[in-house]
Image (cartoon, helix red, strand yellow):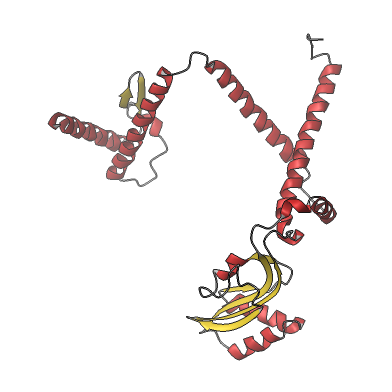
Amino acid sequence: MKGLTFNWIIFSILLLISACQFVSKPDQPDRVLAKVYNKSLQLSELDGMFPEGTTKADSFLIISAFTERWIREALLLHEAERNIPSDLNIDKLVRDYRASLIRNNYEKILVEQLLDSTISTDELVSYYNKHQEEYQLEDPIVRCNFIKIPLSAPNPALVRTWWNNLSDPEDRLKLMEYSNQYANMHLLEDEVWYRIEDIASELPRGTISTENVSRRELTERGGDYQYYLRILEVKNKNQIAPLAFVQNQVRRVLLRDRKQKLLEQKKEEMYDLEMRRRNIQVYTQ
């Protein structure tokens, strides 16, 4: 044990010397930091890991931590190499992986250049109407008006007046302007749907939950806040989610389908072109 401790001290000192020289004299010859069987870690492999102004002590910590991780990874790789199954074709795996990377990168370029990412309202509605059953709710959601205002905010009487007259466009606008300035949270868009738990997390504990969401309206004080909540509509678990709630999901599905069609079309165009150019030979027919 003493020998191991002494060796570790010597190793740490050497690392610190390397760190100091790397930071102060980056043009110094490269150094080996560690070896595991036939693999070596060079100090140059840590290039770029030392932010400007890094102290010698911090440099040592960076080098030491990186070296320890590298040793463990190198040992794992060594054992993996020793236990490669005889029927595993590494060269083929590498070729396939390389081809996959190149293909994916080119597909990404094609999509960026050619894909029309604009989804019209008609497309959203059409897809949603055909696939409504796929959008059943896992938890209740609500349309609501909600404001959470610190008790220290001014003109609470005006807030109550505006709140009670939200159907009046002018009072709604005044409350929105006030809430933008003073409220910790405000939800005053009638057509937007929210998860019950997101609303409940902003209210005093136990005020509403998925079990008692039928409570339609409340005005109460709790802690340092005044709360106003008016539930306009509830959709319960297992009901079909409204399009307004799932439109981003629908849009992603439509874009994914459009992307797949684009790539398939490009493949067919390439195939037809190269067949005409006689760059494709088929020997299986």
Q: Nearer the viewer, residue 116 or 128?
A: 128
Q: Nearer the viewer, residue 152 or 285?
A: 285
Q: Quadrant of the C terminus?
A: top right
Q: How many marks?
A: 0
Q: Nearer the viewer, residue 60 or 161?
A: 161
Q: Is residue 178 above or below residue 237?
A: below
Which image quadrant for residue 71?
top left
Residue at (19, 34) in percent of width and height: 9
Residue 236 position in % (x across, y down): 68, 64
The furthest residue to the bottom: 157
The furthest residue to the left: 2
Residue at (82, 27) in percent of width and height: 268
Residue 133 position in % (x across, y down): 76, 52
Residue 119 position in % (x across, y down): 79, 51
Residue at (27, 44) in percent of width and height: 57
On the picture, is 144 further left or further right than 284? left
On the picture, is 37 further left or further right than 83? left
Which image quadrant for residue 14?
top left
Which image quadrant for residue 98?
top right
Q: Is residue 52 above or below residue 77?
A: below
On the picture, is 224 further left or further right than 180? left
Residue 1 position in % (x across, y down): 15, 31
